[in-house]
Image (cartoon, rainbow, N blue to C red):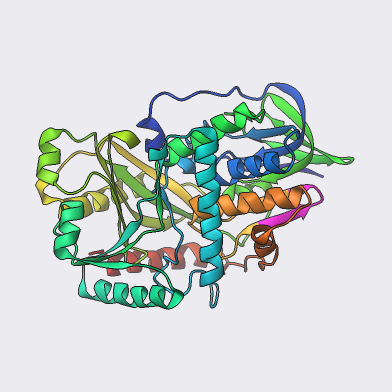
Amino acid sequence: MTRKVTQLPALIGPAAWADILPKPATYPALSGPATADVVIIGAGFAGLSAARRVKQLAPDAPVIVLDALRIAQGSAGRNSGFMIDLPHDLASSDYAGPGNDRALIDLNRQAIDFGRTAVDEFGIPPDYFDPSGKVNGAATEAAHQHNLTYGAHLTHLGEDSEMLDAQQMRELTGSSHYLSGLYTPGTVTLQPAGYIRGLAAGLAAQGVQIHECSPVIEFTKQGRDWQVTTPKGQISAGKVILTVNGHLQSFGFAKGRLMQLFLFAMMTPDLGTESLRKLGGQPRWGITPSDPMGTTMRRIDTRQGGNRIITRTCAVLKPGMRASQAQMRRAAGVMQRKFDQRFPQLAGLAMEYQWSGHLCLSRNGVSVTGELEPGLFSACAQNGLGTARGTLTGIAAAEMAMGTNSEISRFFSAEAQPTRLPPQPFQEIGANLVLRYREWQARAD
């Protein structure tokens, strides 16, 4: 059976994390016929983690990685760059379901260790993988109480945290907006595009063939092998791993089971001396909101691409996987107001970058990781936790493909499949009404 790929990635705005770095190495588009033991489709956190795990298990195995875009121009260059170890969906007392907190913390820390060893092995700049922790910011009394509850939950789990008062938050961020914050030390703040580029370069040095601008347009099983076709080439391989997150449905799988969300972000220009003087605060920090529908903020310095502040908020469900320019404009207005509220000393500062990023969630919080058909594996549906969860699902799919297992692959093998979504148009209309209401509720955060 031949499967046609129905849709390719389409995102609004630049992948800013990639654009603020020096000009990268490039990899050729696939041209002509090729063979491999394993073909990996998608070169983000899941795809490159899968490639590294395959090479760990079978160093001599020929591996090819394809991406429809340039490396780090997709979601890897558009996320907020938090690789979080702890439960952080504060809408629930658990990370992904009752009783899962401890197991998922342990798995997330394995993902962080996997990234840390890659940084050492491949010589990735350590500033791109900064174990600096993060703060849950609270701008209202209700949010502060939420943080107190969350802190108590972490204490129950035996995890460290520290409550920061308004003065400490001001000293950290330069902003008087926050009443308090809950600091947790285990999060790594990434320069996500820099980390992904370094991962790709290290794998290429190990013999992994990487092909950019090589979208897969169809694939089919012929005998024991898969034939994977791009516009200018074709690969014959015994095993294929799909690491395309929400675009799994574009490959014909999990239809009606995946929620396609877009989040929006913006980034300041490289701040000059006078702006930095007005801003105050520390040169690097990361704030996640106490309410998941609030606003994420990060500040970076020159070692990560300039003295800049990144703002991310607003979500919209788009089953067709296409956000609109009107939605981008609305989000940009909301984000500018949020930025100005937090930093009145820089109010009105024109942003250099504005963009959208694509997330994929399932209703029951599970991924789609496993063997879809003989020799065809998936590491998709990261539920908005792509840096850590993508790393884990990539590792798991690679282990399944190579016939081995670990705590990671056993965990994902045991997950249920995503539950079905409501039919259209109720899915899109209802979900977006809920998202807009929750955004309003979290307006201060």
Residue beneath the point at 38% across and 39% down? 127
The percent position of residue 442, horizontal first and vertical second, equals: 29, 67
**Residue farthest toward the right in the current orientation of the protein:** 223
Judge from the rendering whether residue 48 lies leftward or rightward of residue 72; answer left or right.
Answer: right
Return the residue nearer the eye: 111 or 6.
111
Q: Is residue 324 visible?
A: no
Residue beneath the point at 22% across and 54% down? 338
The image quarter containing residue 369 is: bottom right
Return the residue nearer the eye: 404 or 442.
404
The number of numbered discs placed on residues in the rendered structure image is 0
Residue beneath the point at 51% across and 49% down? 321
Return the residue nearer the eye: 68 or 307.
307
Return the residue nearer the eye: 186 or 311.
186
The image quarter containing residue 217 is: top right
Quadrant in which the C terminus is drawn: bottom left
Residue beneath the point at 48% across and 74% down? 94
Q: What is the magenta segment's predominant secondary structure?
A: strand
Q: Is residue 311 visible?
A: yes
Judge from the rendering whether residue 62 lies leftward or rightward of residue 328; answer left or right.
Answer: right
**Does 371 appear in magenta?**
yes
Q: Which residues are magenta?
A: 369-376
**Does 245 appear in magenta?**
no
The percent position of residue 161, horizontal first and vertical second, equals: 34, 67
The percent position of residue 167, horizontal first and vertical second, equals: 14, 62
Judge from the rendering whether residue 24 lies leftward or rightward of residue 437; answer left or right.
Answer: right
Quadrant in which the N terminus is drawn: top right
Picture layout, residue 115 above or below residue 423 = above
The percent position of residue 224, horizontal first and vertical second, equals: 88, 41
